[in-house]
Image (tube, rainbow, N blue to C red):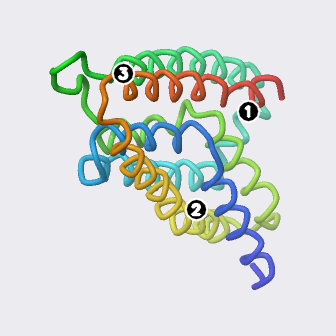
Amino acid sequence: MTLETLLALMTFALVSSITPGPNNLMVLASGANFGIRRTVPHLLGISLGHAFMVLLLGLGLGQVFVTWPMFHTVLKIASVAYMGWLALKIANAAPPEGAETEGRPFTFLQAAAFQWVNPKAWVMGVTAVTVYTAPGAGALGAVLVAAAFCATNFPSVSIWAWMGTQVARWLSSPGRLRAFNWTMAVLLMASLVPILLG
């Protein structure tokens, strides 16, 4: 991989990681509801889980979708169902008056597993592997693409979690926190629209 290709890959990984999507909206809500410290396993799960998925795509998993296109449809259906469930969890995370916040932040394994039903994560991974690895690059090409995402993804999702903690001060009112969580739930579902229509 040339230096120019590596820089282009890093730029793509950064831009696709830091722009709004399911992961970023979820860590924004987690930062607001649970704080940075309790959100760290979620952040690590996203970063390492996505890098692992990209590595497997680079090693040939993406060929499954070319050989059996029905798996793409199955993935879309599973993604919509799972995101709907997550949106309900986020929407209902606001505490009733004087109560503790319901729910828990995502664990490392939950966040890592989520990458497999996150349509944006799939699009990012497949695009990077097909555009930035040369034919015959083999395992080294897959490792470089995965490493680029790992290096850019963690800082990107951390910024979104930090923004959530900043918003949390304004969300000290249960009514505002409830409205924020419902807004995040709606945006999470809306983030599926461009991918599902594509």
Per the model, the C-alpha gap separating discs 2 and 3 is 37 Å
For residue 175, which numbered disc appears in the image? 3
Q: Are marks 1 and 3 in contact (CB under 8 Å)?
A: no
- Between disc 2 and disc 3, the foreground one is 3
Mark 3 Cα shell of 10 Å, populated few (<14), some (14-19), many (≥20): some
Q: Position of residue 29 (x, y in %)?
A: 42, 37
Q: Residue at x 78, y 30 (%)?
A: 194
- N-terminal label among 1 and 3: 1
- The residue carrying mark 1 is 65
* Residue at 51%, 29% in the rendered image: 184
Quick check: 135 above or below 79?
below
Quadrant of the rendering where the N terminus is positioned:
bottom right
Secondary structure, mark 3, is helix
Whether the residues at callouts 2 and 3 have beta carbons within 8 Å, the answer is no
Mark 1–mark 2 contact, CB under 8 Å?
no
Residue 12, position as x, y percentages in the image: 73, 62
Q: CA distance from mark 1 to mark 2?
A: 21 Å
User: What whole-number distance in Å separates the C-alpha atoms at marks 1 and 3?
Assistant: 44 Å
| 182 sits left or right of 102 in the view | right
- At x 78%, y 65%, the residue is 132
The disc labelled 3 sits on which kind of residue?
Answer: Gly
Task: Residue type at mark 2: give it.
Answer: Phe
Asked if 95 appears above or below 144 in the picture, the reply is above
| Quarter that holds the C terminus | top right
Query: Where's residue 89, x and y in %?
Result: 38, 20
The kind of residue tagged 1 is: Phe
Residues packed near mark 2 inside 10 Å, few (<14), some (14 to 19) or many (20 plus): many
Q: Position of residue 163 (x, y in %)?
A: 45, 52
Name the residue beneath numbered marker 2. Answer: 149
179 left or right of 73 in image: left
**Viewer-nearest of discs 1 and 3:** 3
